[in-house]
Image (cartoon, grey):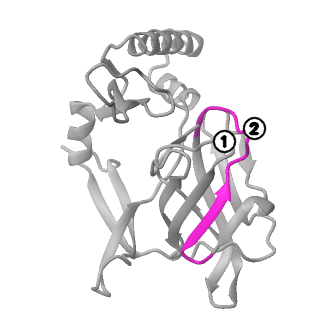
Amino acid sequence: MTNEKDAVMVELYDLLFTDKKDDRFGRVITTKSLKEDDLIHLAVQRRTDLNPSTLRSSLDILKEIATEELANGASVYFGLGYFSLIVNGVFLGDHAKWDPDQHTLHVKTTASAEVRKKIKSLHVNVLGMAQSSLVINTVTDVASGETNTRLTPGGGVNLAGIKIRLVGDNPDNGIKLTEQASGAITPIPPNTILVNEPSRITFIVPPSLPTGDYKLSITTQYSHGSVLLKTPNTYVFDNLLTV
């Protein structure tokens, strides 16, 4: 039976890639962003006999072992899913060699059966149209050609979306990259934004951006035409972007 708390909220946005004016797409509202320390804290609240330091040490050891095994070609079931390595790129001929300029390794993640079962049982509350129509649909890394997966330091990025043009004098306006492990925020300098349109933005990733997993967010006062919002809207892109 689904617990009353096991529910998500969905907001609707205009779907522009269709001839039907009333077509919408849904987006799950992110209620909070939890890190490992947050999960450990919640576990200790649930089980007061657990030691936070022991949990942290155990988790770190398991992560290190899982990463080492994955790096040696193992398929690893850890946490919420299964992890394995896949190859991107085309090989020419039966005896082709590995070319780092043409071939890359990526991690494939598949949700576990437990997670899939839980998601299937959730109650979904559709709240109607979102108050803000600002949305990012795709983030394309120009250097690799990949969409919604990675960022290349010093390379270009194309954003496609709705009402994403950066305008207004609010100090919060702009594009930010937030590293998920540390929480460090890297703003995109305005002079590296090459295209700034309502449905398209192109910018350059800072060349010194450290490796890690990032969330991209955009804040703007754009509404339509020359009309500006008094309070800026912020949109956080759903996918993690890896550097």
Indicate whether 94 appears above or below 20. above
Residue most extreme to the bottom: 226
**Which mark is drawn over residue 153?**
1
Residue at image point 39% right, 29% down? 107
Q: Secondary structure at mark 1?
A: loop
Report the quarter where the C terminus lies. Answer: top right
Q: Earlier in the sequence, mark 2 or mark 1?
A: 1
Residue at image point 32% right, 31% down? 92
What percent of the width, then of the height, locates residue 93? 28, 27
Frontmost residue, 36 versus 64: 64
Q: Which residues are magenta?
A: 197-213
Location of residue 87 by image quarter:
top left
Q: Secondary structure at mark 2?
A: loop
Total marks placed: 2
Indicate whether 147 appears above or below 75. below
What percent of the width, then of the height, locates residue 158? 56, 60
**Apparent side of residue 178 relative to residue 52 in the rendered image (left or right):** right
What percent of the width, then of the height, locates residue 113? 21, 32
Name which residue type carries label 1.
Pro
Answer few, some or many: residues within 10 Å of disc 1's Cα (few below 14, many 20 plus, some between 14 and 19): some
